[in-house]
Image (cartoon, helix red, strand yellow):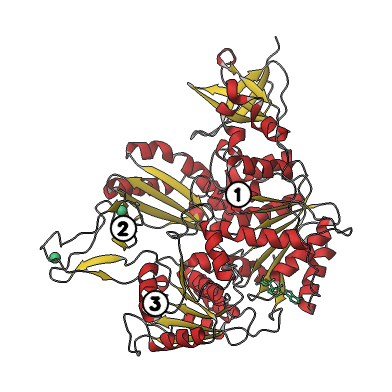
């Protein structure tokens, strides 16, 4: 029997590919079921060499060649290879986890219940009747929108655009018309949004607006991590087989194979959610740019507050700037006002200005939003007589007080819940007081203060059940809510038609985070939450309570001037040599004790300084430091930041040096992650 050698990528934490063989030729990109140690796994054929790397007589045969879906195309494999290389992970950790779960689960193909596998089962199922959606006519574009659409449509080949437009300037409409031009050529469009809870609203818009010349709707597939396995598989098949022309998805959608892809749109491109925070720590926005180059197609990044990286690309001429400077409807921007809390007579942290604005808005029958980026009732419980604080026993953080049908303390870092102390564990004092406030306490205060108002709270706690976020947002849209209290969940994308007031509490806590991107994030977040107000009416107001109204970020907010802010920040970044003027990588080490974690990083740093280390002369390593929250779930953490002026040098260095760290980590009993272009530092 002739043996056809295969090199297979498996999702195991080991570098490299694995040798197998089959009696017949297998195409690259095909999935195979194999034995790996004692386990059965599904992997992907990456190479078909003449000889195995491993000793030939020890190489095992594959158990099954899976042909239920076509082999993954070579352009897709190139994308996966690039991502694996760039983010320094084994290829198997890219190609397998990005597939829908049923396609990588051995149990789905073996045993009695396999019935030909998940794909066969799905195809047997009757198709649900397509939803009947009324198409909406396109509004006439204004001159800036038209220019943007024409510019995107005019060029063929790779092109990168930054669509920079204030909230309500009609970016979505611009995406739609650009998409229509591409769809009309028989091509597919990938439309990415940062958050799952934005997909229903966009799905509706896409279905209403993307209709061909005969009035037939284009097919839309949706992909995000909250979809049931079957649904995700169905969406995946629809786009890879070309039955759907449009894919709407969160960051994972960047890994969908789309045979006719002709345009990628990344909405709210500055959003942190495009960065995956575990496993393969990729940036879907950056991969979108790469994919556009690879496929020679346009990529449109859109934002009201572009990332400083993208803004810098515009300044260097890498991206073409398309500006929407006016609101699409004749509605003025909301006015932003800073309330200096050092000079106000506060009532439990509430300024009279904000209370009065709430009263007026209620009286006018309009909606208000109170934005506070902290859930729970109070961030800490405190004993006034001895100073005890509700420290989490497992973390260097406080346990947060939550109220509800049952009160409890919960640490937001390790998740552990405990009963609320009835008296101080140190001195016995029974009068323990909550310090500070979260969404629940805000809601409680408002209920007392405005008993007639209908309140609604939207945060991770109130939306835990599947579908509940959608239902809560629907209440707001239906006008059943007077005052909405919410975390960043409410700040993005939603178009609340009757919202006339936004009040911001505790913004300062975001300002003094140690991360160098803190001001950038605060600016984006507050501009975004401000943009929720007054999209359909005039005279909307935003009140931001702060102790530091003179800070540059607040002054730029006051003027609603992104460009002023970006210029200020970029000067600072350049002065100290931070992105976008430098490239970073971050190693985070975890161990039982901080000493182990630091010892590992310090030794790693010494290795880096070896004169023979490739790229070492062009990278700079900072000192290893404990994380601000050192201990989480009894694990202590430290990190080491690596910086270079040269992306390529950093890559070369990480390849060699990073490849040597596994052994070292074992020696110090550490786990570590290596992150390229880290977002949170
Ligand atoms: P953005 O995505 O920039 O926040 P949207 O695309 O949601 O803005 O547009 C804001 C509002 O203006 C929406 O209600 C949209 O239907 C409307 N709109 C967009 N373009 C136009 C236009 N050219 N004429 C009239 N209304 C428009
Ligand atoms: Zn006490
Ligand atoms: Zn904890």
Q: Of the residues under marks 3 and 2, which one precedes in the sequence?
A: 2
Please, is residue 4 above or below residue 644 in the view? above
Dot 1, how many residues are within 10 Å of its Cα: few (below 14), some (14-19), or many (20+)?
Answer: many
Foreground pick, 227 / 58: 227
- Disc 1 to disc 2, C-alpha distance: 37 Å
Please identify the residue farthest to the left as the structure is shown: 427
At horizontal 49% and vertical 66% (from top left) the residue drawn is 488
Q: Secondary structure at mark 2?
A: loop
Dot 2, how many residues are within 10 Å of its Cα: few (below 14), some (14-19), or many (20+)?
Answer: few
Residue 470: percent from the left, percent from the top? 56, 60
The answer to whether the residue bearing label 3 lies less than 8 angstroms from the nearest atom of ligand 1 is no
Q: Nearer the viewer, mark 1 or mark 2?
A: 2
Q: Nearer the viewer, mark 1 or mark 3?
A: 3
Q: Which residue is mark 1?
A: 252
Residue 508: percent from the left, percent from the top? 40, 75
The total of numbered circles placed on residues is 3
At horizontal 35% and vertical 55% (from top left) the residue drawn is 413
Foreground pick, 199 / 470: 470
Q: Of the residues under marks 1 and 3, which one precedes in the sequence?
A: 1
Q: Which mark is residue 318?
A: none
Q: Which residue is mark 2?
A: 406
Q: Which residue is mark 3?
A: 446
């Amino acid at each position: 029997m002739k043996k056809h050698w295969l090199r297979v990528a498996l999702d195991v934490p080991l570098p490299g590919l694995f040798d197998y063989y089959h009696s017949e030729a297998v195409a690259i990109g095909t999935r195979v079921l194999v034995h790996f140690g004692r386990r059965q796994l599904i992997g992907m054929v990456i190479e078909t060499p003449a000889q195995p790397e491993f000793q030939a007589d020890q190489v095992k045969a594959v158990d099954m060649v899976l042909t239920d879906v076509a082999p993954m195309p070579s352009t897709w494999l190139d994308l996966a290879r690039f991502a694996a290389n760039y983010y320094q992970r084994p290829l198997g950790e890219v190609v397998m986890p990005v597939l829908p779960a049923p396609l990588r689960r051995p149990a789905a193909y073996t045993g009695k219940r396999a019935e030909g596998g998940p794909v066969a089962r799905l195809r047997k199922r009757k198709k649900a009747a397509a939803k009947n959606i009324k198409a909406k006519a396109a509004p006439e574009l204004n001159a800036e929108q038209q220019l943007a659409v024409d510019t995107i449509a005019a060029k063929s080949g790779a092109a990168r655009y930054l669509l920079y437009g204030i909230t309500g300037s009609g970016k979505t409409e611009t995406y739609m018309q650009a998409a229509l031009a591409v769809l009309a050529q028989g091509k597919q469009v990938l439309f990415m949004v940062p958050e799952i809870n934005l997909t229903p609203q966009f799905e509706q818009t896409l279905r209403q607006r993307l209709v061909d010349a005969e009035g037939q709707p284009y097919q839309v597939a949706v992909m995000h991590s909250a979809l049931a396995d079957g649904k995700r598989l169905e969406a995946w098949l629809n786009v890879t087989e070309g039955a759907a022309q449009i894919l709407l998805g969160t960051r994972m959608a960047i890994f969908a194979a789309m045979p006719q892809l002709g345009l990628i749109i990344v909405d709210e491109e500055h959003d942190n959610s495009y960065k995956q925070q575990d496993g393969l720590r990729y940036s879907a926005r950056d991969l979108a740019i790469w994919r556009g180059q690879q496929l020679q197609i346009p990529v449109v990044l859109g934002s009201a507050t572009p990332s400083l990286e993208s803004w810098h690309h515009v300044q260097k001429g890498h991206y073409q700037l398309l500006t929407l400077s006016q609101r699409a409807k004749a509605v003025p921007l909301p006015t932003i006002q800073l309330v200096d809390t050092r000079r106000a007579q506060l009532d439990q942290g509430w300024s009279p200005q904000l209370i009065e604005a709430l009263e007026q808005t209620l009286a006018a029958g309009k909606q208000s939003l109170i934005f506070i980026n902290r859930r729970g009732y109070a961030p800490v419980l405190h004993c006034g007589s001895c100073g005890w604080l509700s420290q989490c026993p497992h973390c260097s953080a406080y346990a947060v007080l939550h109220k509800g049908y049952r009160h409890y303390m919960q640490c937001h870092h390790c998740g552990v819940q405990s009963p609320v102390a009835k008296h101080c564990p140190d001195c016995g004092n029974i009068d323990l007081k909550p310090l500070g406030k979260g969404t629940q306490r805000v809601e409680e205060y408002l209920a007392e203060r405005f008993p007639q108002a209908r309140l609604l709270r939207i945060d991770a706690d109130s939306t835990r059940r599947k579908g509940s976020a959608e239902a809560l947002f629907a209440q707001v849209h239906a006008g059943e809510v007077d005052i909405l209290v919410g975390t960043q969940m409410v700040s993005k994308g939603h178009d609340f038609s009757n919202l006339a007031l936004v009040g911001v509490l505790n913004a300062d806590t975001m300002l003094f985070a140690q991360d160098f991107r803190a001001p950038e994030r605060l600016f984006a977040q507050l501009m975004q939450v401000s943009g929720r107000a007054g999209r359909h009416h005039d005279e909307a107001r935003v009140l931001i309570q702060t102790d530091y109204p003179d800070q540059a970020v607040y002054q730029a907010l006051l003027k609603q001037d992104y460009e002023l802010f970006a210029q200020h920040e970029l000067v600072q970044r350049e002065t100290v040599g931070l992105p976008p003027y430098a490239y970073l990588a971050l190693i985070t080490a975890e161990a039982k004790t901080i000493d182990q974690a630091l010892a590992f990083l310090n030794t790693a740093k010494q290795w880096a300084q070896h004169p023979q280390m490739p790229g070492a002369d062009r990278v700079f390593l900072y000192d290893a430091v404990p994380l601000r929250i050192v201990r989480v779930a009894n694990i202590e953490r430290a990190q080491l930041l690596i910086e270079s002026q040269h992306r390529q040098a950093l890559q070369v260095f990480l390849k060699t040096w990073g490849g040597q760290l596994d052994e070292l980590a074992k020696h110090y009993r550490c786990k570590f992650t290596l992150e390229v272009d880290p977002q949170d530092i």
